[in-house]
Image (cartoon, rainbow, N blue to C red):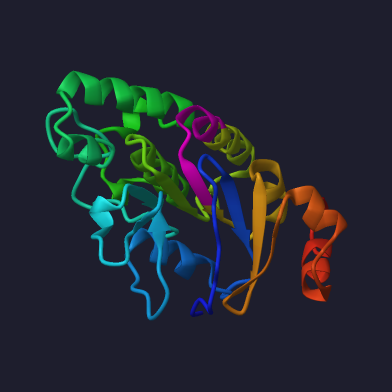
Amino acid sequence: MAVDHVSLKVENREFLAIVGPTGCGKTTLLRLVAGVEKLDSGHIYIHGRCVDDVDPSRRGVRMVFQEHALWPHMRVFHKDMASNLSFGMRLRKQLPRSMEETADLIARRLGIARELFPRKPDQLSVGQKQVVGIGRALTIIPKILLLDEPLAHVDPQRRLALRRELKDYHNKMGSMTLYVTHNLPEAFALADRIAIMQDGKIIQVDSPSEIQNHPANEFVKDFIECFEL
């Protein structure tokens, strides 16, 4: 689904959840911000700077994709060679000891067992891949953290723990966070504001309580009634 004349301002340090039915344009919106999709019209600004022609690697953005996008030939972590958790840190020339400390901290917080460190992605479950993808994004503090259904394949009990860690990371690191999910209760639990999309358009952007108590139209009303909030 194309994004259709969307105008959206996200405040510094804000946690914004983007929700809506399948195919409404949520993922496309994230990919445009990340720079992996190109604009047909309009502009994207990050901290006041137009980034329309800025390479994705220079936008200060980290994205966790639905499909994990791990490097298939790399291990989960290795301090002396390129690995999924160390890749961004190696590009920034961090010392091996610093990379190991960061990877250990992220692994403990996200529940990535150390015995998974030597494994490559094809030796991980879908849920494990998803958590490693989150961990890779968190090893570097970005200006904007983009999360596309990051907990979709994680079991319910672990999902709650990871939700808390993501919110805690956001609060401590101060990055702007855009979080795409189909799970409206999850959006209500995490977000400062929620943007509801339909057919490539943003229908309402408000606080969770405002959306629940004052839906903008029948679509929003029907959408939130599908969930037990």
**Residue 107 inside the magenta-drawn segment:** no
Task: Judge from the rendering whether residue 156 lies leftward or rightward of residue 69; answer left or right.
Answer: right
Image spot of residue 56 (x, y percent): 27, 58
Image spot of residue 217 (x, y percent): 81, 72
**Residue 174 inside the magenta-drawn segment:** yes
In front of the other: 130 or 31? 31
User: Which residue appears farthest toward the right when viewing the image?
Assistant: 213
Q: Is residue 68 above or below residue 158?
A: below
In magenta, the rendered stretch is 168-178
Which residue is pictured at 47% across the width and 26% down the height? 109
Count of marks overlaid on the render: 0
Q: Is residue 19 above or below residue 98?
A: below
Image spot of residue 121 (x, y percent): 30, 48
Image spot of residue 141 (x, y percent): 36, 36
Which residue is pictured at 41% across the width and 32% down the height? 112
Which residue is pictured at 32% across the width and 66% down the height? 52
In front of the other: 228 or 74? 228
Which residue is pictured at 22% across the width and 35% down the height? 89
